[in-house]
Amino acid sequence: MLQTVSTTMRDRVAMYNDNALKIGLFGMNCSSARSATTVPERWSASWPDCLRIAQMADAAGIDFLLPVARWKGYGGETDFHGATLETVTWAASLLAATQRITVFGTVHAPLFHPLVAAKQFVTADLVGQGRFGLNVVCGWNEGEFEMFGVFQRDLETRYEYAQEWIDAIKAAWTEPSDFDLDGTFFQLKNVRAFPKPHGNTRPLIMNAGASGVGQAFALRNCDAFFTATASSRLSVAENAKRVGEIKQAAQALGREIDVYTVGQVICRPTQAEADDYYRHAMIDNADWGAVERMLELKNVTRATVAEEEFQRQRAFTAAKGIGGYPFVGTPEKIAGELADLSHAGLRGIAFSFVNYIEEFPLFRDEVLPRLVEAGVRTH
């Protein structure tokens, strides 16, 4: 039976507040989060720690939590991302323990049958009373897919599959009676899917496809597009430029889409303290074994590229390639950079800390109020 409660997509897009700049925490379901570092205070991703920071973020008015879907670590001294919590059950559990925050599940489409996935997402959405969001991933590391006996399709076919997958899920969320889906990849007969998502609408959908075909998929199907290209990791200005390009592409299709980015925050009372810790955690104590494994998955090794290029990519991956653009500095500096992104049209940012519980209080107490003063957040 359909729920009698009613809501709108605007409620979901707003994530229950009027903040112009949405702020989320990224990657906290994975050991070491988005920092390939060996420092002892690196993130644990234990359930008690995830629950604690989620409730801290919820109380502080943070807008969303975005996990990383990961099945196998990258090795190195810490086995970076070697311990991870599955994202849909993680989201449902956190939604039951919070009041306002939106929690995303990140799902590899080739690993989840769409009808099973649709039911999982509805369950989480009803637990959170409309606060569940879906982050769709269409391809991934071969070594992780091989664990499931699934192999990567070519790029075009990958997104053709993903289109049928998301179409089936949306049908399960919306069709009032039994339906069929006769596609290339799915032949579904007499499908019956109840209940529907909270308020007879649907969860927010996001995607971060970097290729042209991936971006086209996001522009057709999603409410939010995450950009984390090499150029967007270099500066606030490059992020702003990328936002403009994506919005223009969406308008050419007659759609509007919100653009988000990712980053890492290292906030300290002084610039010197922030710079020192950034260098200490991300460079001096980088988990180089894990960094080199990530490069190997992209076919970047000492055997495939010149030594100078290898060292350049190695340094970039450790400093910016994993966590995204580094916001390093005082509360004033970080608030200013975030406000600049908002004024450039960016809808939101998901960022990580080396240790969320230890570092979030300074961000909450000193950066968030400055963003209110800048007019990009209401609280």
Image (cartoon, grey):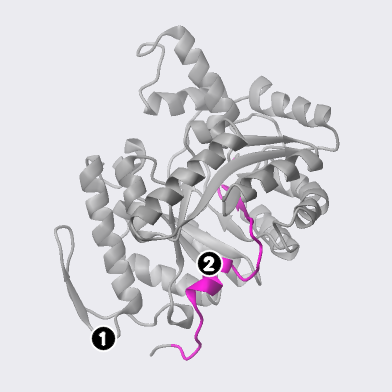
- Whether residue 12 is in magenta: the answer is yes
Q: Position of residue 131 (x, y in %)?
A: 55, 70
Q: Quick one: SS at disc 1? A: loop
Q: Position of residue 338 (x, y in %)?
A: 68, 45
At 52% from the left and 47% from the top, the residue drawn is 84
* CA distance separating discs 2 and 1: 27 Å
Residue 316 at least partly seen: yes
Q: Main secondary structure of the magenta part?
A: loop
Residue 227 at least partly seen: no
> Quarter of the image holding residue 183?
bottom left
Q: Nearer the viewer, residue 153 or 209?
A: 209
Identify the residue under disc 2.
13
Up-down relation of residue 186 to residue 128 (above or below)? above
- Whether residue 139 is in magenta: the answer is no
Q: Amino acid at mark 1?
A: Ser
Q: Residues within 10 Å of mark 2 (few under 14, many from 20)?
A: some
Identify the residue under disc 1.
177
At 69% from the left and 48% from the top, the residue drawn is 339
At 29% from the left and 73% from the top, the residue drawn is 171
Q: Nearer the viewer, residue 162 or 251?
A: 251
The boundaries of the magenta stretch are 3-31
Which mark identifies residue 99? none
Q: Position of residue 249 (x, y in %)?
A: 38, 49
Query: Quick check: 215 left or right of 83?
Result: left
